[in-house]
Image: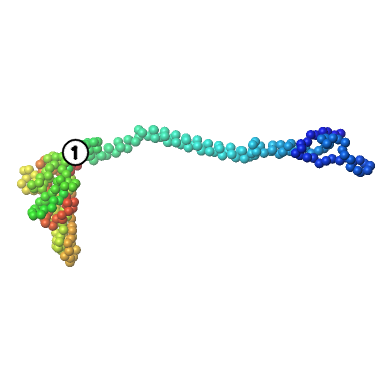
Amino acid sequence: MACTVNFEPNYPFPQVFLVDGGGGRPQDSAQPPNLIPCWSFPPAQERMKGRGKSKGCMGISPGLALVVLFLFLLVFAALGFEAFKISRIEDQLRNSDGEVNQPAAEFSAPQKQIGLDESGLYGQDKSKRVAAHVIGRIEETEHPKTLRWDSKTGQAFTNGAVAYLTADGALQVNETGTYHIYSRVELIFKQCSPTSSFDHTVFVRRIAHTAPLTLMKAHRAGFCPQHTSYSWTTESYLGSVQLLKKYDRVYVNVSHPKLLSHSHYGNFFGLYTI
């Protein structure tokens, strides 16, 4: 029994010859050329289709597809977690608006206990605060022990209920209160010796008191090295809190005014309310 199969010209089949049992001479097949026996090989296209089915969709194996899908899930999970964290942070920032000012309110309580004026914390008009700072004035001829100052040069100023009196070098306060008073002097000893010394004094003249009242005083000695005749610069600083009355006049004295340096910023004097 024979079957007919159409073949493609691109896939040629070997010729088939029938041999009889008698003479052994090959004879041409009685079948037409387009007919071959049914035991011929299956077409090549069917074999190729059978091989392609094992590779999965679009030529990708199922195992590789599962790995790619798992990676995509990890990426989306990470993005979702980051978005959740950002949302939590934004909520915390919104809710913390009412808590920011709380430490400042707690900190203001001990400030009130130590006597700090509330007006100094909440917008006190600085133009009304009593303060003065005057700097050294270079004297060419006279050198009085009670020093004179410059109230308008450089950083010197007077503000509020205080005035500088040019005639005698005093800072006069026109308001009773507690003041911080300070003074610095700088002296140059051209022939410094172990016995060199000087006095630096801050005092006040008050109405109904004929004698001046000493507020601060320093005696400096022993600042020169042994056996030297070179110039030597030294200084003295005084500062303290004092209760001053209205119309008090504050002065600075130096025992050796001729030895004062010619530095405006090395010699200064001032006060301010506290």
Residue 21 in the image, given as x and y percentages of width and height = 92, 41
Q: Name the quadrant containing residue 255.
A: bottom left
Farthest residue in the right direction?
A: 22
The C terminus is located in which quarter?
A: top left
> Coloured how?
rainbow
273 horizontally vs 53: left or right: left
Q: Does residue 127 appear anywhere in the picture?
A: yes
Q: Is 251 located above or below residue 66 in the figure?
A: below
Residue 70 in the image, given as x and y percentages of width and height = 58, 38
Look at label 1 and name its amino acid. Ser
Q: Does residue 118 appear anywhere in the picture?
A: no
Crowdedness near tag 1: few (<14), some (14–19) or many (≥20) residues, C-alpha within 10 Å: few
- The tally of labels here is 1
Q: Is 167 located above or below residue 72 in the figure?
A: below
Give the residue displayed 83% in from the left and 36% down from the top.
Answer: 33
Q: Which residue is mark 1?
A: 127
Residue 79 in the image, given as x and y percentages of width and height = 50, 37
